[in-house]
């Protein structure tokens, strides 16, 4: 009865997270199941409370809101008519500096709408969608920032005109690097703790 209760408790723990992959119930004792469930809970708590996780969440939320705002300004004058007019003027100058765009059918309006739609869509993903899609959105926005910096350099804008793109490009790079590091670290810690449990189980078997 005790083994059944332990197995039921551990199974409920792993069922709470669809990404968790519990060990085979037929090959593990109830106490081993309970021990692994405790390790998994401990690892999840450490990951949620770690400074890296808090930094990633804060950066994702702030960057997401910024790009939703900037993308909306490029698409509609409802937020700011002056900013919308400035965006229209800027993208006309970008299109003139890149005559190859007109040859492939990309006008200044279409270019502005493509950039704005990418910023809004990826900003929403960064703010609301959990998991790997955040990293994909991060990478796409980083490419957008590189393109915007290229446009500003192409038309000879002063630094104050594209300083925001430079700053947010750096922030996107930092967020992506931190996210990749935080993904690798828990996996190594989990494997070490699981190996320690397996060694303890082997010692118990040898002693018995």
Image (cartoon, grey):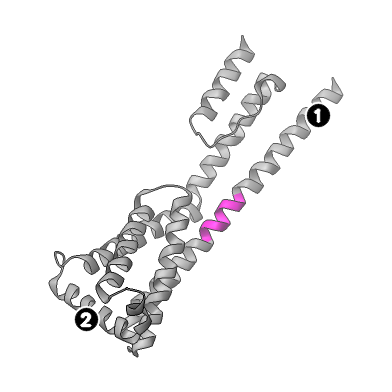
Q: Which mark is residue 10?
A: none
> 111 or 1, which lies in front?
111
Vertically, is 121 above or below 197? Answer: below
In x, y percent, where is residue 32?
Answer: 68, 25
Within-10-Å neighbours for mark 1: few <14, some 14–19, many 20+: few
Residue depicted at x 33% and y 88%: 155
Q: Quadrant of the N terminus?
A: top right
Vertically, is 125 above or below 159? Answer: above
Residue depicted at x 85% and y 23%: 207
Q: Main secondary structure of the magenta part?
A: helix
- Residue on which disc 1 sits: 202
Label 1: state its secondary structure: helix
Label 2: state its secondary structure: helix
In x, y percent, where is residue 153?
Answer: 38, 86
Q: Which mark is residue 89?
A: 2
Numbered disc in front, either 1 or 2: 2
**Magenta residue check for 189:** no
In x, y percent, where is residue 92?
Answer: 25, 81
Q: Which residues are magenta?
A: 178-185
Residue depicted at x 40% and y 75%: 147
**Magenta residue check for 181:** yes
Vertically, is 145 above or below 157? Answer: above
The single residue placed furthest to the top in the displayed view is 1
| Residue 63 appears left or right of 110 | right
Q: Quadrant of the C terminus?
A: top right
Within-10-Å neighbours for mark 2: few <14, some 14–19, many 20+: few
- Which badge, 1 or 2, is on the more N-terminal residue? 2
In x, y percent, where is residue 113?
Answer: 27, 67
Distance Cα–Cα, label 1 vs label 2 = 71 Å
Residue depicted at x 44% and y 54%: 134
Q: Number of labelled discs? A: 2
């Amino acid at each position: 009865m005790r083994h059944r209760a332990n197995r039921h408790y551990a199974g409920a723990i792993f069922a709470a997270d669809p990404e968790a992959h519990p060990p085979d119930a037929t090959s593990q004792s109830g106490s081993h199941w309970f021990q692994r469930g405790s390790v998994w809970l401990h690892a999840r708590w450490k990951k949620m409370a770690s400074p890296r996780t808090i930094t990633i969440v804060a950066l994702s939320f702030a960057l997401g809101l910024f790009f939703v705002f900037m993308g909306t300004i490029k698409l509609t004058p409802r937020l700011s008519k002056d900013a919308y007019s400035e965006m229209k003027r800027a993208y006309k100058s970008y299109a003139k500096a890149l005559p190859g765009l007109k040859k492939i059918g990309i006008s200044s309006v279409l270019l502005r709408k493509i950039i704005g739609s990418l910023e809004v869509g990826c900003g929403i993903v960064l703010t609301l969608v959990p998991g790997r899609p955040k990293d994909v959105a991060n990478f796409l926005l980083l490419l957008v920032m590189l393109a915007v910096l290229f446009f500003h350099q192409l038309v000879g804008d002063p630094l104050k005109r594209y300083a925001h793109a430079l700053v947010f490009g750096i922030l996107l790079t930092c967020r992506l690097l931190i996210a990749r590091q935080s993904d690798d670290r828990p996996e190594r810690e989990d494997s070490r703790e699981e190996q320690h449990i397996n060694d303890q189980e082997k010692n118990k078997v040898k002693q018995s």
